[in-house]
Amino acid sequence: MAVSGRFVLLVALGIVPLVLIGEPWVLGGWMLVVAALTALDLGVAGSPRQIELSRTVPARVRLGETVQATLVVTNPGSRRVTGVLRDAWQPSAGAVSTRSRISIPGGERRAVTTTLTPFRRGERRAVHVTVRSFGPLGLAARQATLSAPATLRVLPPFDSRKHLPSRLARLRELDGRTSVMIRGQGTEFDSLREYVRGDDVRSIDWRATARRNDLVVRTWRPERDRRVVIVIDSGRTSAARIDNEPRIDTAYESALLLAALASRAGDRVDVVIYDRRVRGRVQGATGADLLSRLVDTMAPVDPELIEMDWAAVPALVRSITSQHSLVVLATSIDAPGASRGLLAVLPQLTRKHTVVVASVTDPSVLAATLDRSDRSAVYRAAAAERALLDGARVSAAVRQLGGEVVTGAPADLPPALADTYIALKAAGRL
């Protein structure tokens, strides 16, 4: 049972006859009257326990987008249910309002719509719905909490897709330029054209020349179906927030942009989210199915407060592919101590693969190095300089061991990683 403001007001009004008459029994009599009215009101109120609920909730939504969740409330009883309904979505689901006024006659149903704008990635759930049914006097309500489970999967926003058209244009330009420049073993046949002075005589197609009665040469294009393996660190360092975004979310954005770009280039992309065990894996997907499976896999995976097991990463990569591949390690390289495990396994990876280490940097650290306004700011600037030097030491060690390093702020890292992929392709390292 729940009481309303009317009940409190009615009890308070008992002071008036007590003051006017001045007898204590007046207050007792007034309370009996209030109790009788409340009991009558409760007895007439519709039963909330008879309410039947059904939901219509979108299966997926991108982070930051708005969707409508519909709750159909059916009253199979004979009495009208009038009151308040509370749909208990998680706070991170971003419900505009969780309370709704309802008035449902017996044998009818009503739809209650809740606007959701999630502000956290992952599984956003609603478990219970609470219904308060007031009587005609509005003094008290019968209350029941009913089970009505629902799940809304909030996908990574993939804001970095705005960089995809420009990178695809550069990739097409690169592909067109290299298709006539690359010759010899390890390339794919593209087309035939007439011989011009300066062409390598080894590219002459003698059969086509005999058929056409003119010198014809083969043109080649870079090999397709290269392998790109992206390993995303989901250990404790990926939980740190930079620019109000967890490191792992920036890694997801970078992986999505690189996967979209590489798949358009004809390369095979495999993604693994790992700390001490595999949290998510996407293998063998191509085209539009690749991005769909990636965002579905990434959505429910959050960082684990454990250390990353770098010693298992070379075996993990070998289980995915045995051929030369581009291996992207999305992790943190801020501190030499925390990066010791990464540096220890890099030689095993760089011996066979092209390795790129992608790490997000904190713009506030760089800003702190520029502030010398007071004594505290000077100490902060010194600490920030030390942090930058530590990151530079780790980056230099990665390069010395044969890897590439890509760093940037959360908004800059995804396009920077895509640019590195294109540069490696242009250099013939993929």
Image (spheres, grey):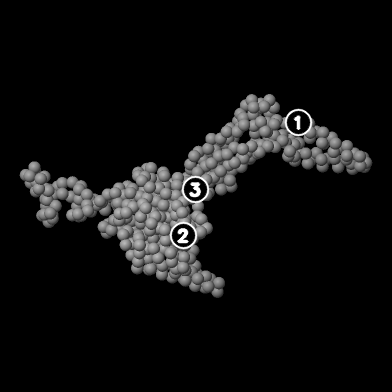
Q: Are marks 3 and 2 in contact (CB under 8 Å)?
A: no
Q: Earlier in the sequence, mark 1 or mark 3?
A: 1
Name the residue beneath numbered marker 1. Answer: 43
What crowding class fits label 2: few (fewer than 14 Cα within 10 Å), some (14-19), or many (20 or more)?
many
Spot occupied by residue 96 in the image (x, y as percentages of width and height): 58, 43
What crowding class fits label 3: few (fewer than 14 Cα within 10 Å), some (14-19), or many (20 or more)?
some
- Name the amino acid type tagged 1: Gly
Please, what secondary structure does the residue beneath circle 2 have?
Answer: loop
Spot occupied by residue 298 in the image (x, y as percentages of width and height): 45, 49
Tell me the CA gap for discs 3 and 2.
19 Å
**In which image quadrant can residue 310 be found?**
bottom left
Spot occupied by residue 61 in the image (x, y as percentages of width and height): 48, 43
Please, what secondary structure does the residue beneath circle 3 have?
Answer: loop
Q: Is residue 21 left or right of residue 369?
A: right
The reply to whether residue 143 is in sight is: yes
Determine whether 376 is above or below 180 in the image: below
Name the residue beneath numbered marker 2. Answer: 308
Spot occupied by residue 396 in the image (x, y as percentages of width and height): 38, 68
Please, what secondary structure does the residue beneath circle 1 have?
Answer: helix
What crowding class fits label 1: few (fewer than 14 Cα within 10 Å), some (14-19), or many (20 or more)?
some
Tell me the CA gap for discs 1 and 3.
46 Å
- Name the amino acid type tagged 2: Met
Name the residue beneath numbered marker 3. Answer: 300
Image point 88% across, 40% down: which residue?
A: 27
Q: Earlier in the sequence, mark 3 or mark 2?
A: 3
Determine whether 110 is above or below 161 in the image: above
